[in-house]
Image (cartoon, rainbow, N blue to C red):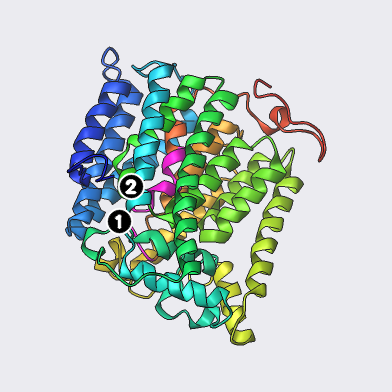
Amino acid sequence: MQRVLFEYSLDPTTWVYLSSLVTIGIYFKFRRFWSVRNVDLIGLIAFAPGLLLVGHGQEHLGYVWLLIVGAAYLVRLLLDPVMVRRPLLEPNLSVDGLVFAGVALLIFLSANVVTGKLTESDRDVARRMDMLLAGEITLDELGDSAPRSPGYPLFHVFATFSNTALVPDAQAEAPPLPRRALVRAVVTRATVIFAHFAIVLGIVLIGYRHFDNLQTGLAAAVLYLLLPYTNEMISRVDHVLPAAMLVWAIEAYRRPMVAGVLLGLAAGMIFYPWFLVPLWCSFYWRRGLIRFLGGVVVAVLVLGLSLIAIPHKDTAALMTHVQALLGAGVFSLEQPVDGFWRFYNPVFRIPVAAAFVVVSLLMVLWPAQKNLGTLLSCSAALMLGVTFWYDPGGGVYHMAWFLPLLLLTIFRPNLEDRIAMSAVSAGWFSRPATSKA
């Protein structure tokens, strides 16, 4: 972009100030100062200082800040099912203005991904991926690139390729990549851009098809693009791709099989969406449960079979990766190298994780009557709750896992009539009910 916009530079701090002011200008309801919508907007803006603190080396204070704001939002999401009155508070910008702003933001954010230089870490992983796909090494010989997080091993290796692509201090020139590895670079960048586009499109369609209000969907999508987190973590595949799966699972909630496949893929990638399964099973309990679980099983089997097809050193190595796919090590007590728990004894993660598991199971019983609104808010609450104890990380740093669902919860109307018995089709090959069902 430097060839077009001379001396163009927009650092994270400037973006925080600019996006916060634009957010207030577009969404703040000045005539209803004490509305819940205004409080939600202030809460979203409050995440930004924590991100800046982490990005500028004050990690301890930054993660504590993010944890406090996240805890406040966790309470807000758990209370959302009892907030029956949902007045329509339209943004201060017309539909045409929202469309223009959304397209412009998406183009600029995509340009940041395309023009970001490859770091030496990126190049190293690219070469290893090239050797892996050429059959020269096995997945077990990837060395430091092998994932220590639970989930699909190849996804974590693939994500590592772009996770540091926009780090200014590491943008040193290096020898050219092999052609196949360069193709991998293009594929990774394209995946990031496509995933962000999928999130935006999914949010808009949810507003149009399930909220019966196109402007509401556009408003939530533009706010997603405006938030400092989206700008700062624009290149993180491991953040945005699972988030896209979760958004489209919500969009496809009237098709249990499709929703199950999407949720299963997200769970296979990063494991943690598995804690959403009890909640979603409770939603589909009276209609669509078998189809939903069938979709989840199909997705996991596809990932498992693809993992088996990859060359491994021996059977023990294959089983190690299969166990990682199923979440082995998720409750590890090793000292994290990053995040909130890096500064504390990881043994204290155990009660936090135990409380989270209990809450995820209790979602089967509460709220007793599940509708699309409770599915949204409780899914957002659970994915937010994960970030309090997951490893590596800790603190609300994988915000993309819950941020789109949180925005949809903030903007949603009353959805008490969107229950499985009226919105989900009766059989495998029946057409789903209309959104107004």
The quarter holding residue 288 reads top right
> Considering depth in this image, is 221 or 416 the residue closer to the camera?
221
Q: Which residue is mark 2?
A: 112
Does the image show residue 390? no
How far across and how far down the image is residue 10, in percent? 21, 43
User: Which residue sits at x=41%, y=31%?
Assistant: 103
Q: Residues within 10 Å of mark 1 (few under 14, many from 20)?
A: many
> Considering depth in this image, is 419 or 362 the residue closer to the camera?
419
Q: Is residue 225 magenta?
A: no
User: Which residue sits at x=59%, y=26%?
Assistant: 210
Question: Is 100 located above or below residue 281 in the figure?
Answer: above
Is disc 2 placed on a helix, strand or loop? helix
Question: Is 132 located above or below residue 231 in the figure?
Answer: below
Magenta-drawn segment: 392-405
Q: Earlier in the sequence, mark 2 or mark 1?
A: 2
How far across and how far down the image is residue 48, in percent? 25, 43
Instruction: Give the Cα distance between marks 2 and 1.
Output: 8 Å
Q: Residues within 10 Å of mark 2 (few under 14, many from 20)?
A: some
How far across and how far down the image is residue 215, in percent? 46, 20
Q: Which mark is residue 166?
A: 1
Question: Is 176 located above or below residue 228 in the figure?
Answer: below
